[in-house]
Image (cartoon, rainbow, N blue to C red):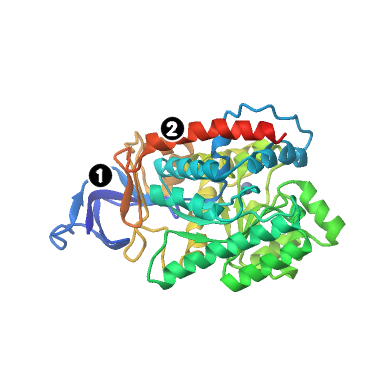
Amino acid sequence: MKLLEGVRVLHFHPGSVSEPTDVAIDGAKIVEVGPGLAAKYPAATRHSPGGYVSPGLVCSHNHFYSVLARGLMVGIEPSKDFAQQLRNMWWLLDRALDEGIVRASGLAGAADAAMLGVTSVVDHHASPEFIDGSLDVLAEGFAEVGLRGLLCYEATDRNGEADGLAGVRENERFARKVDAERAAGGSPLVDGAIGAHAPFTVGEKTLGALASACKSTGRGLHIHVAEDKFDAVDSRYRFGEDICVRLDGAGLLGPKTILGHGLYLTRSEIELVNERDSFIAHNARSNMNNCVGYNDNIGLYRNAVLGTDGIGSDMLEEAGFAFFKHKDSGGSRWMDSYLEMLQNGNRLLERYFPGKRLGRVEAGYEADLTFWDYDPPVPLEGANVAGHVAFGMGSRMVASTMVAGEFIVKDRKPLFDAEAIAARGRSETRRLWKRMEERK
Ligand SMILES: [Zn+2]
């Protein structure tokens, strides 16, 4: 058992801050929160972290495969639009990924997330020249660091239908492997969704295979939709239907479905997504970076969550960008709307981790916690949490990170070999650059 003594419990949404109190953790779970617990749990290991403890942060849409893409020393053809950007940059990158580069990317992505107080990452993976077994290799990074996650492979027909179907099989294989671990009494930290790239690169046969995979594994689809207008236009032109109508027709919209972006979904599609209780992942920074437009309709969704789309895992920064982009567009939503989206990531995870409760520092919840070394010059109270996050608090104040009752970062020191992970990343990046040049 562990006992956290004299910490203030901070909830970002709905905003609340407690007086200093104790948190008792048994195994992976919080068993009690209240003052003076030391007498009740005398055998517990005692920690006095000071500061604040909040539920762990969740990144609900990420691509660890692009962790090594920063500072790319490869000549990339200039692009006139988003589809060209995919071809010239991202599809050149993902084809160059092999087992070693995927392993290094998973490790570096997980290490970065942990240092930023992120306890769970929902990843969307692509490596077309290394499909079979790629999710196991990616999962090694999560296991090494101790991060919780939800993985999938982005099935796509852009390199042929055989590859599309191989992608679907990888998703199914990984989900079944997790099921076997659970059946054997394990409690894996990583689960699998059924991934696909985007409707404009998924033909009818692969779409049908995705639907069967969702049904047979009990998982949901994780796919980009209408990130750019091209995807929405292509769906109506080639398939005669709005994207979400097409997905729903195949039985692919449900309570475990995660749709990335959705900038060009129509009002009726948004209603359909809400009826099916599906999730939409908002990635404001990535949308700005790709100049695809702004999802001003994000406030209309029942289940909106926040992702970085591969731009690191700093979730307070991401929430801030989402808020400031909204303000810049003339919007009137306050920062707490974005903290609600951040919090919603826990509801998404609960749908994949049966029986587990995530996202509160309360008895019965998983001990996925972020510890904050924050000593604000302004009183921090429940009613002004959002203002603190928008204008003062940041992930640089993360002191420790705990997943399922285990510290993975403690007092700003990683409990994994961060130096070796970074060194491996640098050497694999040189190979990545070479392999990209060879594939141009
Ligand atoms: Zn994405």
Residue 256 point in image, percent of width and height = 58, 65
The type of residue carrying mark 1 is Pro
Q: Residue at x 14, y 59 (%)?
A: 43
Q: Is mark 2 within 8 Å of ligand 1?
A: no
Question: With 15 as the anchor, is 290 left or right in this view?
Answer: right
Q: Residue at x 25, y 43 (%)?
A: 50
The type of residue carrying mark 2 is Ala
Query: If you read the primary sequence from the N terminus, does the residue marked by circle 2 or circle 1 appear first?
Result: 1
Residue 178 point in image, percent of width and height = 48, 65
Report helix, strand or loop for mark 2: helix
Q: Which quadrant: the C terminus?
A: top right
Residue 107 point in image, percent of width and height = 46, 43
Q: Which quadrant: the N terminus?
A: bottom left
Q: Residues within 10 Å of mark 1 (few under 14, many from 20)?
A: some
Q: Residue at x 38, y 37 (%)?
A: 418
Q: Which label sits on residue 423? A: 2
Q: Is residue 278 visible?
A: yes
Question: With 170 as the anchor, is 367 left or right in this view?
Answer: left
Question: With 141 as the anchor, is 413 left or right in this view?
Answer: left
Residue that numbered label 1 is attached to: 49
The mark lying in front, picked from 2 and 1, is 2
Residue 408 point in image, percent of width and height = 34, 47
